[in-house]
Image (tube, rainbow, N blue to C red):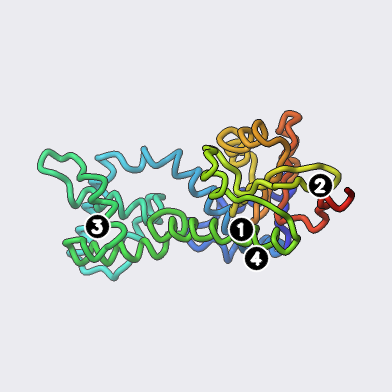
Amino acid sequence: MARVLNQTTYNSLLDSLYKLPFRNRIQSLQKLFPELSVDTLKCVVAQECQKRMKGSHGRLTTSETVEVMYKKFTNSILMNEEPGILLRLSDEVGLTPALLARSIIERHYQRDDKSKPAKLLVSTLMKNTALIDDRDLAFETYLCLLEDEEYGPIAEATKQSKGYEYEIYLRMELENCKVSFLHEDHLRMRGYDKTPDIKLEIPVAIDGQVINWIESKALFGDEEVHRGYLKDQLYSYWNRFGPGLVIYWFGYVEDLEKIHQNRIILIRDTLPTNMVLMDQHL
């Protein structure tokens, strides 16, 4: 299944994505883009959702807007509507289920002076909905967390687990290839602050280019994502260790390497099988 997209295919995917209902979009996209892997589609959907929420979250969670949503919720409970009230409200207003549930919880636990409750309290209730003092709100929040693949404690735990899973997988692949390396835990013990996932003890060559480090990203690499990582991480690694490799396990948009400004950082969607170990030719 394809994971590396040209710009035309990527733009077409985004156009189709924006025309679909907020939830359950993966099945529709699979029919439209059968050549793309499910993991790639899931990753693109999740990342685009997060970009959209960054742009609209403030507007959708003003005190006036939250008050309207809270009244709709409480009225629906009084009218004995079937469960899934907050999920339907999420579809209506355009907030992800977990973010909507968080806003409703904040309103439910609003202080006497109408200020928001402590963030620690809200985070605790989101992680353990059984602690919410209203049975209906607790169950509705639980449903939201199960449905939301982008936000909330379940989604965050899944992302962290997947990121760690691919880091471990990369280490195993390197060991199988007899490549000597240090991982980020080793580097931190040696006093490094910003560290790649893998620092090769002996450089390897990939497609004629020597690399000294590898960064694992369990996501899809589009231009915005990649520029962010270049600024926050990858250029720091290049300055300290020289040329390297970043692996976007769920694919990337072609030609991202053109934005590196002559700093050599290879991009792949898996660990290349054509690595040349430097000591093979000594």
Q: Earlier in the sequence, mark 1 or mark 2?
A: 1
Q: Which tag is nearer the camera, tag 3 or tag 2?
A: 2
Splitting the image into 4 quarters, where does residue 82 fall? bottom left
Mark 3 or mark 2: name the one nearer the start of the chain.
3
Residue bearing mark 3: 73
Left or right: 15 as drawn, with respect to 203: left
Q: Considering the numbered disc 1 on the image, is that residue within a helix, a strand or a loop?
A: helix
Of discs 1 and 3, which sits in the foreground?
1
Give the side of residue 115 with respect to residue 83, left or right. left
Q: Which residue is mark 4?
A: 31
* Residues at marks 2 and 4 touching, judged by CB atoms closer than 8 Å: no
Label 1 environment density (alpha carbons within 10 Å; few <14, some 14–19, many ≥20): many
Using the numbered discs, state the Cα–Cα distance from disc 2 to disc 4 in whole angstroms.
Answer: 39 Å
Question: Which comes before the other along the chain, label 1 or label 3?
Answer: 1
Res 129 label: none
Between the residue at mark 3 and the residue at mark 4, the CA separation in whole angstroms equals 35 Å
Query: Are discs 3 and 4 less than 8 Å apart at CB?
Result: no
Looking at numbered disc 3 in the image, what kind of residue is underneath it? Phe
What residue is disc 1 on? 41
Q: Quick one: label 3 or label 4, which is nearer the N terminus?
A: 4
> What residue sits 21% from the left and 42% below the top?
116
Q: CA distance from mark 1 to mark 3?
A: 32 Å
- How packed mark 3 is, by other alpha carbons closer than 10 Å (few <14, some 14-19, many 20 or more), is many
The three-letter code of the residue at mark 2 reads: Ala
User: Where is 265 relative to 77, above or below?
Assistant: above
Residue lying furthest left: 112
Circle 1 or circle 2, nearest the eye: 2
Q: CA distance from mark 3 to mark 2?
A: 59 Å
Check if mark 1's residue and mark 3's residue have beta carbons within 8 Å.
Answer: no
Q: The residue under label 1 is which amino acid type?
A: Leu
Spatial separation of the CA atoms under disc 4 and disc 1: 11 Å
